[in-house]
Every structure is written in C-alpha cells, then in structure tokens.
Image (tube, helix red, strand yellow):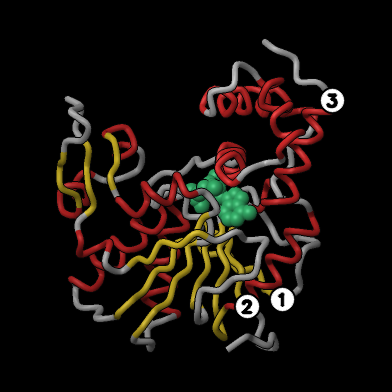
Amino acid sequence: MHELNDEVFLFFSRFIESEIGIQYNETNRYLLLSRIQNIAKFLNFSDIDSLWKDIKTHGVNESAKSLILDIATNNETSFFRDPHVFDFFKNEFILNIMKNKDKIRIWSAAASTGQEAYSLAMIMSELNEKGLNKSYEIIATDISERVLKQAENGTYSQLEIQRGLPMNLMVKYFDQVSIDNSSLPFYKVKKELSSHIKFMQLNLLNPWHHQGNFDIIFCRNVLIYQSVENKKQIISRFAKMLLPGGYLILGGAESLLQLSNDYDLEVFGNASVHKLKADIVQNI
Ligand SMILES: C[S@@+](CC[C@H](N)C(=O)[O-])C[C@H]1O[C@@H](n2cnc3c(N)ncnc32)[C@H](O)[C@@H]1O
C-alpha cells in the first residue's frame, strides 16, 4: 500500500481532530490512509499525493471537507444495540421514573443511521398501544450527512434489519421496498414511527442550536474517540440540556469516571446509567 508520509498524516489527523474531535494516531494510521485513498479516488485524483498537492494550493473546499469528516467517523450501530439499555429505558425509565409525565423528550446524540432512534420509538409505540398514553419526541443528531440521509429515509438492508430487530417488530413497523433495481429486499420504516423523530446535523463540539431540554440523552459509542477535554466539555453541556432528574446513557465501554461530578451512577440489571444530580442548573 502507498505510504502516508508524516506531513500528510499530520495534516489529515489534525484537521479531523480540530473539526470533529476524533483522534487518529499511530495505531490507526493505516485506517486513515485507506480512508483518504478512497476520498482521493472519489474526487478523481490519481492518488493521495495529487489530492495533497491540490489541498496545499487551494485549501480544503467544502465538498472535500464534508467527505473527509464523513470518512473519519465510525458509524457502527444496530437495532436495540446493548439490549439491557433498552430494558432500562422501557421497564425503569418510562414505566417507573417517568410514570407521571405526559410527554417525554429524548435526544439520540450520535444517531448514525438511525437504528437507536427507531428502537426507542418502537418501544414507545408498543407501550402506547398497551395503554401507556404518553406523547414523545426524539431528536436524533449526527455529524455525518451520509448517515443522516439514510436515517431520515429509514430504509435498511436485510443485513441491517437482521442485526437486532425482532421479526415481529420488523413485520409491524417496516414495509418491504425495492430500491435501485436491486433484487435484494430493503425495509422502510413506517410513518407512524418516523413522524416522532426529527433528524438534524449537529457537531457535538460546536454550539447546539436545537431547542428545549431532554428527559434522557443517549450518547453512546462516540465519546470514546474524543480527547479527555472534549469529553468533559460535552458531558457538562449535556448536564445543562437535561431536565431535572434526567438521565445520560453512554456506551457500554464508556464511563464518567474522572470526567464529571454532575451525575450519579445508577445500575439497573446490567445497565449502568447516569442520573443528573439535583443541584445542577439547567438552560431552561
Ligand atoms: C459508532 S457510531 C454510534 C451510533 C449509536 N450511538 C450506537 O451506539 O449504536 C458513532 C457516531 O458518532 C458520530 N460522530 C462522531 N463524531 C461526532 C461529532 N463530533 N459530533 C456528532 N456526531 C459525531 C459518527 O458520525 C457516528 O455516526
């Protein structure tokens, strides 16, 4: 494989970290190399050197910037990923902690292709069908335009569907569709779910302009790629966006240890969740 010289590696890794906080270092140098090779190809450059020469002369234009930031992200996700978190959401958070609230506001803060937001919407819809009678709104955000496009469209391949979505929910909430003359089946989420979700582009490192406060924020498997300083800053801003008694849910490998004192750790079954402390002042 083509070598990525130090100057080029430093440029791209610093550019990505300054824009979206994701850190590339020596251990994932080759991952970055192969991703930049794909961008060079996509932008019709013969190789990385030609792309690099162009950037040195003209700077990074908007389409190259969007591509670079897009390929820098890891978009791994699936329906009901880490099921115990969804057990907590359904059995403890909605049915118990929020039992006296009529309307629930949820933020899926690194939504990727939307499976997390649709999983939460399916839980709410199933509970409402059984008489819960709560309205809910899910704001789902991500930095990547590409994943947001799929999330908003709500269309998934058979493989994506098979990752975590129980058959009965697939049949109930998705329609089989065909796209691009493909003989493979795709599945599109029904309006009754998607109408509760607003997808928006948002960089967690930039100011947040979406409105209102939230009862629960899911920010799973994204802070892991950020520096300690960025993690601290984002987590403290989440505290200001949560309603009193609100919860922050992180990924299974993520914790608030040495990052924040704004939350109390609570454990429900196999789920560790973070409850906002009572004395935190919100931006309401
Ligand atoms: C690994 S996925 C996690 C998806 C989902 N939360 C889950 O756990 O299944 C991480 C997502 O974070 C997004 N992301 C990375 N950096 C971001 C940033 N600075 N602001 C907003 N989203 C970001 C990526 O585009 C990607 O879709």
Q: Nearer the viewer, mark 3 or mark 2?
A: 3
Point out which mark residue 6 bears: 3
Q: Is residue 180 left or right of residue 29?
A: left
Point out which mark residue 276 bears: 2
Residue in the picture at 77% in, 63% down: 259
Q: Secondary structure at mark 3?
A: helix
Residue 62 position within the rendered picture, expressed as x and y whole percent measured from the top left: 59, 46
Of the pair 145 and 54, the residue shown nearer to us: 54
In which image quadrant can residue 176 be found?
top left
Q: Which residue is mark 1?
A: 262
Q: How many marks?
A: 3
Residue in the picture at 19% in, 72% down: 130
Cβ of mark 1 under 8 Å from ligand 1: the answer is no
1 or 2: tag closer to the N-terminus? 1
Q: Is residue 24 left or right of residue 80?
A: right
In which image quadrant can residue 256 be found?
bottom right
3 or 2: tag closer to the N-terminus? 3
Is the N terminus in the top left, top right, bottom left or bottom right quadrant? top right
1 or 3: tag closer to the N-terminus? 3
Amino acid type indicated by mark 1? Asp
- Residue 256, above or below 165: below
